[in-house]
Image (cartoon, rainbow, N blue to C red):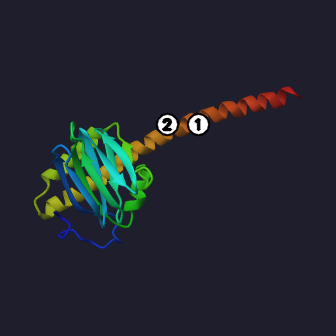
Amino acid sequence: NLQETQRLPSIAEINLNYFGAEQCDPGFSFGPFSRTSYVLHFVRSGCGKLYVREKAFEIRAGQAFLLYPGEETVYQADQKDPWCYMWIGFHGLRAQEMMDKAGFTREEPVITFEKMELLTGLMEQLLQAKELTYVNGLLRMGYLYQLMGTLIQYHSCAEEEHQESEDVNSMYVRTAINLLINSKD
């Protein structure tokens, strides 16, 4: 638990609080609980549910879910196929911005991530840097930034593909309108 050793003021861009991994027992549940930082979970296998603001989200392998500071949540592993997940807790001045750019919202705190092995690979490296040494502290912050960059990069790529598709469709519509307008002349 790095929460006490790395408790930096929220004026820093982003800070790591804690991280870990868990293979849950069937039906394992955590909460209700409200956190003081963001906690991001990456589901490697299995499935479960997240309960927040009277909503239930079914979550499966290849998805990530975000717990927001100040929100009371409960999450529970499936009885038949309990999830195995990795988590990372963080806070900071730009933490909300980074989560927004990664595609998380309070209304939709779950995203599907097609390159989950990239994230879990970074998390495995982070887990190996658990000893409280100066070098490991630097490595942990590097892995945190890499995680954020990877989340945002792949969300941005999906957004750009969608935007390019819209741009091409808009171009065809504009061309058709121009042809119709010019053909009346």
Label 1 residue SS:
helix
Residue 10 vertical position relative to residue 140 in the rendered view, above or below: below
Give the crowd class for mark 2: few <14, some 14-19, many >=20 residues within 10 Å: few
Residue at left offset 15%, top offset 60% = 135
Residue 62 vertical position relative to residue 145 in the rendered view, above or below: above
Name the quarter where the C terminus is drawn.
top right
Residue at left offset 39%, top offset 42% = 154
Picture coordinates of residue 127 (x, y %)? 16, 52
Q: Which residue is mark 2?
A: 161
Picture coordinates of residue 28 (x, y %)? 19, 49
Give how far apart the Cα atoms at labels 2 and 1 are.
Answer: 9 Å
Name the quarter where the N terminus is drawn.
bottom left
Nearer to me, 81 or 89:
81
- Which mark sits nearer the N-terminus, 2 or 1? 2
Tell me: 157 left or right of 132.
right
Res 88 quadrant in image = bottom left
Picture coordinates of residue 169 (x, y %)? 62, 32
Residue 174 vertical position relative to residue 96 in the rendered view, above or below: above
Labelled disc at residue 166? 1
Res 58 quadrant in image = top left
Q: Amino acid at mark 2?
A: Glu
